[in-house]
Amino acid sequence: MPVTDTFHDEETLTLTIVAEFAAEPERVWEVYADPRQLEQIWGPPTYPATVIDHSLEPGGRVTYYMTSPEGEKFCGLWELIAVDRPRRLEFRDYFADEDFAVVESMPGSRCIYTFEATENGTRATCESVFDSSEGLRTVLEMGVIEGSTGAINQIDDLLSQN
């Protein structure tokens, strides 16, 4: 399994997920840079994603929705802050409505994804910094660790296809 560690810290308002992949950082980066590949891994296995907009550059946006097994859509968006291909991606992550407007009543976070070369491939670290401890607690209660772990663990299958 790619996910090797998960931890959260209410003092720093962070949730961190670490994963290891048997592929170079450039290849792991492509999973996020290509909207069709991102669709295959963004969201838990039973909630496939559909990417609508995908501008992976500072000031750009990524909009998407995940579809539940019952057909319910859950929308989200990223607002890109910084991009350092293939090492680092930083964005604001929000829950969104069907018009891809931020849902203010739901927690947002600043996400920093780093891809570091290792002897065996890539170590990916996904850190989310929440605006409040209540926001962090909300996503933890929603099952973000389980959902994110399931999503990230799909990357190995995608990498093995290429």
Image (cartoon, rainbow, N blue to C red):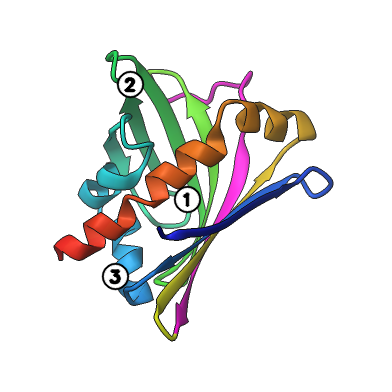
Q: Residue furthest left?
A: 162
Is residue 152 at all visible to an observer of this figure?
Answer: yes
Q: Residue 132 got which mark?
A: none
Q: Which residues are magenta?
A: 99-118
Please check the rendered image and state whether residue 103 is part of the magenta-colored stretch, yes or no: yes
Q: Position of residue 153 (x, y in %)?
A: 38, 51
- The residue mark sitting in front, 1 or 3, is 3
Residue 136 shown left or right of residue 117 in the figure:
right
Q: Amino acid at mark 1?
A: Gly
- On-image quarter of the C terminus: bottom left
Reading the image, the residue beneath label 2 is 68
Q: Secondary structure at mark 1?
A: loop
Q: Residue 59 got which mark?
A: 1
Residue 107 shown left or right of residue 61 in the figure:
right
Q: Secondary structure at mark 2?
A: loop
Q: Amino acid at mark 3?
A: Arg
Q: Quadrant of residue 22?
A: bottom left
Viewer-nearest residue: 61 or 142: 142
- On-image quarter of the N terminus: bottom left
Q: Residue furthest bottom?
A: 119
Is residue 107 at all visible to an observer of this figure?
Answer: no
User: Vertically, is 131 above or below 162?
Assistant: above
The residue depicted at 47 percent of the width and 46 percent of the height is 149
Q: Residue furthest right?
A: 11
- The residue mark sitting in front, 2 or 1, is 2
Reading the image, the residue beneath label 3 is 27
- The residue mark sitting in front, 2 or 3, is 2
Mark 1 vs mark 3: which is more N-terminal? 3
